[in-house]
Amino acid sequence: ELVCDANQLTSLNVSTNTALTKLGCGSNRLTSLNVSNCTALTELWCHNNQLTILDVSRIPP
């Protein structure tokens, strides 16, 4: 689990965290987020960012 809300982050690399189950990165300044390799991810909170790219392509439904 990783929670990094409200830190004014402009980038976040979680691409090697394949065991990550929960990610909270809301209220930052992210413009893109790639969680496609985080195949164990079951919860994602990325509200209040400036996202134009969100890659969840390999996350199971």
Image (tube, rainbow, N blue to C red):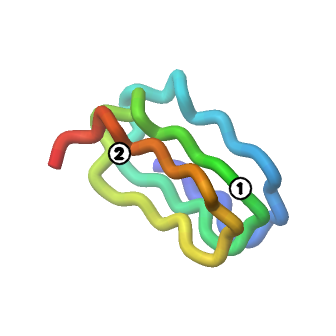
Q: Residue 32 appears at what percent x and percent y?
A: 65, 49
On screen, residue 24 versus residue 28, left or right, reads left
Above or below residue 21? Residue 17 is above
Under mark 2, the amino acid is Thr
According to the image, label 1 marks what residue?
Answer: 31
Q: Residue 34 appears at what percent x and percent y?
A: 53, 39
CB within 8 Å, label 2 to label 1: no
Q: Residue 55 appears at what percent x and percent y?
A: 46, 43
Which element type, helix, strand or loop, lies under badge 1? Answer: loop
Q: Residue at x 37, y 30 (%)?
A: 19
Under mark 1, the amino acid is Thr
Q: Is 29 or 51 nearer to us in this picture?
A: 51
According to the image, label 2 marks what residue?
Answer: 21
Image-quadrant location for residue 15: top right
Image-quadrant location for residue 11: top right
Q: Residue 22 appears at what percent x and percent y?
A: 40, 53
Image-quadrant location for residue 25: bottom right
Q: Nearer the viewer, mark 2 or mark 1?
A: 1
Q: Residue at x 57, y 35 (%)?
A: 14
